[in-house]
Amino acid sequence: MTDRRSFLASLSALGGWLAGPKWIADSATALRVDAASTVFYAQPDGSNSLVRFAITGLDAPAGRLRVYDRARRLLGTAGVLRRDNALYGELWLPLDRETTVISELEAPGLRGPFRSSHLLTPQRRWTLHVLTAADPAELTRSLNGLPAMRRAVQAASYNSFQVAVNPLPHSLSLTRLEHVPFLRMTETAQAVEREFGIPVSDAAVVEDVTQLLATTVLALAGSGIQVISIEHRGGDPFQWLVGPDGSRLLAIVTPPGGTTNSLGFTATAEEMTQRVGRWLSESPLFLSPAYQKSAAVIVNSASDHELAHVQRAVSEWNSRYAYPRITAGRSDPLLEFIEQTRGASIPVLKPKPMLSTIVPTGLQLSDMAQAGRESTEARTKDMAAVFAGLLGSSEAALETIASEVAAIVPGTLVFNPSPFSRSGLVTMTDGTEQLATNVPGLGYAYFPDSAEAAAAAEWTETSPSYQIEGEQLRLTIDRSSGSVASLIERETQREWVRADGAGLNVAEASRLESISRWRLSGVATRLELQRWSPGRGSLHTTVTVYDDLQWVDVVNEAEAVGGQAVEYRFDFAMNEPSVVWEVPAGSEEMPAPVTLLKHLRWIRIAGDRDAMLLRGIDAPLASIRTDGSLVSHAPAGRSRYRLASQSRFDSLDTPWMFGWGTTPLRTARVEPRESARLPTFGNIFDVDRVGVAVLGIIPAQSHDGAVVYVQELMGVERQVSLAAGLVRFSRARVVDFLERDQGEWVVPEDGRVMIPIRGSGVTAVLLSGLELNTG
């Protein structure tokens, strides 16, 4: 029962919602009393529901309504007041099941009580879970703008309300990240936790779900995230998003209007009551079958400067109502509730591949290429820093390592940051170009200076020709356009240029103006082409075929024309191919056509029996048509490409080996030194090489050891061997992607530990007690 003052206040708050067409009748109609249950339940146990009554067909200014159960026990008495064309009143009534009640209306003009029977059905008991996940960048700016004392008080206030930091910053661009920064995408939020003591939320708020890669699930789950809130785009409001390794997140759709601001959390208590009641009662989404067993919805938090208002609103609300209950903080109660109520009915989905919607400008493509180069450079520096730190230096890491190589004569240290052993053409520190062979993955090889090698390491011009023939490949240039007219694998005679196509590295309407042929003895042959093309102007192209290496390198240098993107087309002989491409922490796949995919290191265009592998080193955006043509969207200026074929007999990790093989080899000068401690050849750590890649090695946050990120490439759950190389370790443990403990310390046997890893998954391993292993 409610007193008159409270009734009048609530009636005023209800405003136009009570006067909606659901209860209004013409004044000439017969007297009628209607009753309706609401979503509101009283404290403390939620057994009483707020029932609203509407009386039409009566001209009295007010009246009194008594309500009885079927045994004539009085349940409550309420005053009813006029608003527009009806009288309205409300009562808290016991309503835990479908119940029939009897109302008796007394009002001026009535000769006696007017009795009505009402069948009341309890509405669902809703739980609203507020995601108080503030953007880390915005939260940092807000707190740093306060004086020190006030900053501490504000941070403590946020903690008392269980405010958390959104693991996904609004400004994060996932496709531009290298593997390890992608896996550590929640590191920005973790920095806020370290600085201000505000914890990282285990639920992520995503503004645009189309900007999520399939591997985002893997990265978030590996950082302790359980729930992801996504914007409403139709479909089931509860979904399991599954990553390539089987990890999963519960994705909950925020219904339209489900923000703290739109629901009145920052308005008055009466306004909030009105908005929440209308939202839960009138939203078509809540009438869908998906909500028949679940009564929990996500409400996204406001911006951080409104969180104090939200805190007060939630506290006051829960003191008034048992339901709708409003909870905030960790998502464990929400997960448990939804799994209990929905169980196996929650659909399991894999995110669709993320594709761009518009072709960026030439400047934007240049920025993308630059971001990729910077990420690769940072990865190499982190890896070398772990090694160099054991040599007593934290700067100029490669030079530090080179200074400790036990060399007899001067030479070059060639450092290979990729996970796989590789060979490649390298410019040595003496200025010569040489083929560096079998440089170990995650390690280096020393190549001494040699007068004989220097004499041979010069490109010499030979007789002009339109064809190059190596041990593996035969390539022919079109005499008119300068595109690659034919690319044949000599062993199988497989032609990779489509018969009705224009060739490979096609510049639309290009004209070949000159050609020259150059030879690096024992290594490679190169054709230099000068072309002209509308929209590109002067176009200088080099095509290199190696004697023994099974790939082709292409470099285009185009004039900048209006700052627009430049297109190069590759007409491969492959009809209706499937397309797979590398993204951070994994790969995406879909059948052609694929428009504007963003690849990290490789694209695989596969037919029934074989596949073509391609990397646009400076042009990571490409489109593939159903006829096998690939269009590369490149920046003006330099655009480098590498092409290689894959047989159906090759290993599943061949594309990864190809892609990592395009990572630049780094060099440093080696001078003889008597006290040098390092051998001339070796790797930092030794990891299973078949179907496994080390995505990165970084110094540990604890400043004691290193974290190694290992990826499984074959889709098979197994144990992976991690052993000492030039660096040994005293113990190891599995950690999450933010270096939080996930297992017990393990002591290596014979310098080796076995690490569990899911198929297509990533495992982070913390190694401590590092020391040089040069004995």
Image (tube, rainbow, N blue to C red):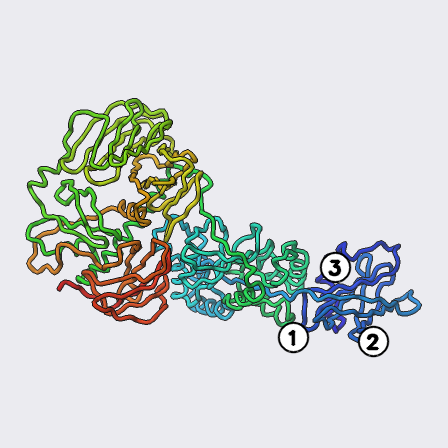
Q: Residue at x 36, y 33 (%)?
A: 573
Q: Can residue 306 be seen here?
A: yes
Q: Secondary structure at mark 1?
A: loop
Q: Residue at x 35, y 55 (%)?
A: 181
Sequence-wise first label, 3 or 1? 3
Q: Which mark is residue 18?
A: 3
Disc 3 marks a residue whose amino acid type is Leu
Q: Residue tagged by mark 1?
A: 45
Q: Residue tagged by mark 2?
A: 72
Q: Is residue 389 left or right of residue 536?
A: left
Q: Secondary structure at mark 3?
A: helix
Q: Secondary structure at mark 2?
A: loop
Disc 1 marks a residue whose amino acid type is Asp
Q: What is the crowding at mark 1: few (fewer than 14 residues within 10 Å), some, or many (at least 20)?
A: few
Q: Are marks 3 and 2 in contact (CB under 8 Å)?
A: no
Residue at mark 1 to residue at mark 2: CA–CA distance: 25 Å
- Spot occupied by residue 260 in the image (x, y as percentages of width and height): 57, 59
- Spot occupied by residue 766 in the image (x, y as percentages of width and height): 30, 65
- Spot occupied by residue 640 in the image (x, y as percentages of width and height): 29, 38
- Classify the position of the C terminus by image quarter: bottom left
Judge whether 420 appears above or below 554 on screen.
below
User: In this view of the protein, which residue sits in the foreground, 603 or 180?
Assistant: 603
Residue at mark 3 to residue at mark 2: CA–CA distance: 28 Å
Where is residue 245, by image quadrant? bottom left
Q: Can residue 554 be seen here?
A: no
